[in-house]
Amino acid sequence: MFVRVVECGSFTAAAIASDVSPTMVGKQIREIEQRLGARLLHRTTRRQQLTEVGQLYFERCRRVLSEVALAENSAMELQSAPKGLVRMVAPVSFGGQRLVPELSLYMARNPDVNVMLNLDNRVPNLTEGNYELGIQIGEVCEPGVVARPLRPYRRILAASPDYIRQHGMPEHPDQLGNYSCLGMSYWLHQDRWDLTGPEGETFKAFINGRFMSNQGNALRIAALSGCGIVLQPDYVLMDDIAQGRLVPVLPQWSYKPTPLYLIYHQDSRPSAKLRSVIDFLIARLGENSQAILDKRPRSDAV
């Protein structure tokens, strides 16, 4: 109001511009002067003039209001067009092999958006990590978080062509105990795989094996080296299957599907960048999306 009084030249003109009474304008200026302990304006019936303190205060106030206007315009621009940095967290394997290609495609389509992706197998905490988006395997318990379902986390079985030539192809999960199965060392039940069949039936396949690891890529490399049958996410194995380095084993069976979610904080007015990333990932990776890796096994792989 003080800046408007100076720019308009009088209390009356400022009151008209602000759609308030001149009395209200005078009251607000007096309150400022009382708070500062100094006069800002010399006022007469014919004109007003800034005091030395008033001149300094006017220049600083006008600068502050200009910065506020710039901040509001910048905020509105961010709301209207995707722009800025997106901080995201995802599991190591899924993030590195499945998410990064999608984010690369997103950034190619949105050149004003940058992404900072942290890969971490711990359950993501958006608040503590200062993340805007996260990928979580398993049910979401963090309060105040929106969980959008993605295509379930699906693990498939595969082995090298040499291993299958030497040991044959199993025809049912109950035969897996006769093969060397490559297991995850941190699983609670290391001696069995809970598999789901083509009709939704389940089967507990008891397994044996000479090699285990806590890292999925190590098991993949062991399978490529002919150590046995591996059970890993489809996106980890599909390229090897497509190139003939691995062949599907019991392709109608897979490990029980694990829920996968895109998570973010509830916000009544999310920024344009956040909305665009969410919409893109849901379209590409969501439950109903068709963006499955186009990797088909060669018919002559074995």
Image (cartoon, grey):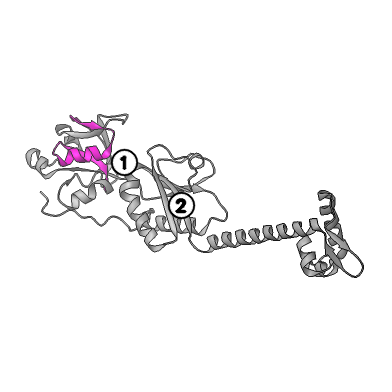
Q: Which mark is residue 86?
A: 2
Tag count: 2
Tell me which residue sits at (68%, 57%) in the image.
64
- Residue 94 visible in this rendered orientation of the protein: yes
**Amino acid at circle 1:** Lys
Tell me which residue sits at (37%, 38%) in the image.
121
Q: Is residue 204 above or below residue 93?
A: above
Residue 114 percent across, percent down from the top left: 43, 55
Q: Nearer the viewer, residue 226 or 101?
A: 101
Q: Is residue 106 above or below residue 169?
A: below
Tell me which residue sits at (90%, 70%) in the image.
46
User: What are the residue bounds of the magenta stretch?
Assistant: 207-234
Residue 62 percent across, percent down from the top left: 70, 61
Tell me which residue sits at (11%, 40%) in the image.
163
Q: Which mark is residue 280?
A: none
Magenta stretch containing residue 221, yes or no? Answer: yes
What kind of element bears circle 1? loop
Report the Cα–Cα distance between label 2 and label 1. Answer: 32 Å
Q: Which mark is residue 256?
A: 1
